[in-house]
Image: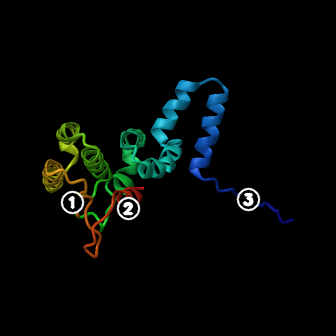
Amino acid sequence: AMSNNTVTTLEVESGDTLRLILHHLTESGLHDAARALQEESGIGAVATHSNLASLCKAGQWGEVLTSLKKLDKKRMYSSLLHNSDNNNKSGSNSIIAQVHEMTVLELAEMGEMDLARATLRLSMEELSEDMQLSIERRLQELSTLRRRAETKLPHDYYGNDVDGVSRHRQQQRDDLA
């Protein structure tokens, strides 16, 4: 007699399994264990990642930096934090560096030149030397224009696109998003 043994397998994504375990830990009141699993696995950081685009578009750079630091850097290191960007003329491929750059530039644009320079000094470790020099040059240009009582920004203040056309603040925000 032949045996009719059928083996059935079900493939489940690891993220789904982790979410199920997280849900169970939370319902069981094991919040510390759930938090530890969430931090180690990066599950739950996806919600933070989905909010980054809207934070960038709104220019909420402090919130963006806080959110980026919450992401699992081991998992995100090669895919997000050091994402190659061909439109980045500043010499750095780091998303974090670009966020620091926008923070400094927007502070200066709002007339907070001292705060912009202080922020630049605090951000030095995140920025390449080329990027630091580029930001300093743009701050100096803006400062010179403001002393002349001009309200316009230098034409390449937020950089240029691939065709050499100057970019605007919102275009740079949208690209970072």
Q: Which residue ends up furthest to the bottom in the rendered image?
A: 163
Foreground disc of the pair 3, 2: 2
Q: Earlier in the sequence, mark 3 or mark 2?
A: 3
Disc assigned to residue 123: none
Residue under circle 1? 154
Categorize mark 1 by other alpha carbons within 10 Å: few (<14), some (14-19), many (20+): some
Residue under circle 2? 171
Count of marks overlaid on the render? 3
Q: CA distance from mark 1 to mark 2?
A: 16 Å
Residue in front for this viewpoint, 109 or 5: 109
Residue under circle 3? 7
Residue in front for this viewpoint, 169 or 47: 169
Categorize mark 2 by other alpha carbons within 10 Å: few (<14), some (14-19), many (20+): some
Residue at 38% of width from left, 54% of height from top? 80
Residue at 27% of width from left, 63% of height from top? 88
Percent of width and height locating residue 90: 21, 60
Percent of width and height locating residue 16: 62, 48
Percent of width and height locating residue 8: 73, 58
Percent of width and height locating residue 148: 14, 52
Q: Earlier in the sequence, mark 1 or mark 2?
A: 1
